[in-house]
Image (cartoon, helix red, strand yellow):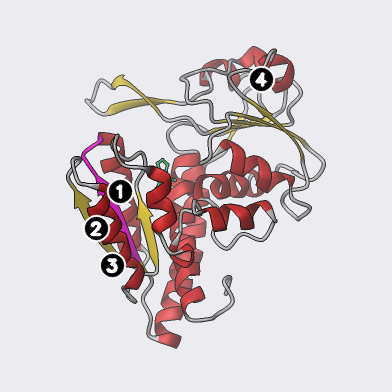
Amino acid sequence: MSAQLIDGKAIAQAIREEIRLGVERLRQEHGVVPGLATVLVGDNPASVSYVTAKNKACAELGMASFQHTLPADITEEKLLALIDQLNRDASVHGILVQLPLPKGICESRVIEAIDPRKDVDGFHPVNVGRLMLGDPVFPPCTPAGIQALIIRSGTPIEGAEVVVVGRSNIVGKPVAVMLLQKQRGANATVTVCHTQTRDLAFHTRRADILIVAAGRPQAITGDMIRPGATVIDVGVNRVGYTESGKVKLVGDVDFDSAVKVAGKITPVPGGVGPMTITMLMRNTLRAARLHLGLPLDG
Ligand code: GUN
């Protein structure tokens, strides 16, 4: 048997259409166009391609985008000055500083300089705190995308055994907290595994929903998956080039062996990736609504 593919592209497209309508309504009723400022420091190829895709998505959904590209040797002081300027700019509702930042710049100092009301990544400690309390203003984009994929693929989360592999601040920790909340679309029993977990396969084989954000190509193989489980592969690993010269990507799950065991599985690319940018767009619309004093989901 072969698992059903969870089509992140199609699900993201459906959500983007809802966002596009929300943007249009905001423009008609309030004369406001949501604006996202992106800040890219240096020329890391993956970061360049993510930021380009984020700006393109803004244009497609009728939002404004303001792209700031800075040299890798910029001083922290100059970067903080730019953030201060964006914090005070009324046409900028959301600020995204692409991570990682070059060595020598303190990431936490930069994140904490962003006005929490414009922190569409949801990385500011104020927003991390709200997430922990179960009332996030800006749910972090990749975890929010993962949750939406699970819900829209028809996998029940309430009471399910969820196992998360990876404990990063961007994916592992926040997605665990989100799925743990006593809320609809959550309420799971959550286990978080990491590099020091003693018997990884023991845990992953118990999962009804397995979320893999290990940062290691093909770390999870089919024999580590419970038959019928829903598998969400967050990994994006560049492993050379395809015959047509495109960058070849693989996930953190060994797709060929996993697809024979899982019930549902996300492909790489075309699974979590398109959802992350979609959730950033949703947060930018929320930031504009917050600025206007409107209910966040309208
Ligand atoms: N680098 C990898 N993922 C992300 C993300 O979600 N936001 C930002 N700003 N940088 C990232």
Q: Which residue is rendered at x = 22% and y = 47% of the image?
A: 75
Q: Secondary structure at mark 4?
A: loop
Q: Amino acid at mark 1?
A: Val
**Which quadrant does ligand 1 occupy?**
top left
- Circle 1 sits on which residue? 51
User: Distance from label 1 to label 4 (Cα)?
Assistant: 35 Å
* Lower sequence index among marks 2 and 1: 1
Q: Amino acid at mark 3?
A: Gln
User: Distance from label 4 to label 2 (Cα)?
Assistant: 43 Å
Q: Which residue is rendered at x = 31% and y = 60% of the image?
A: 83
Q: Secondary structure at mark 1?
A: helix
User: Distance from label 2 to label 3 (Cα)?
Assistant: 14 Å
Viewer-nearest of labels 2 and 3?
Answer: 3
Mark 1 crowd level (few <14, some 14–19, many ≥20, 10 Å Cα): many
- Circle 2 sits on which residue? 67
- Circle 3 sits on which residue? 85
For residue 261, the mark is: 4
Q: Secondary structure at mark 2?
A: strand
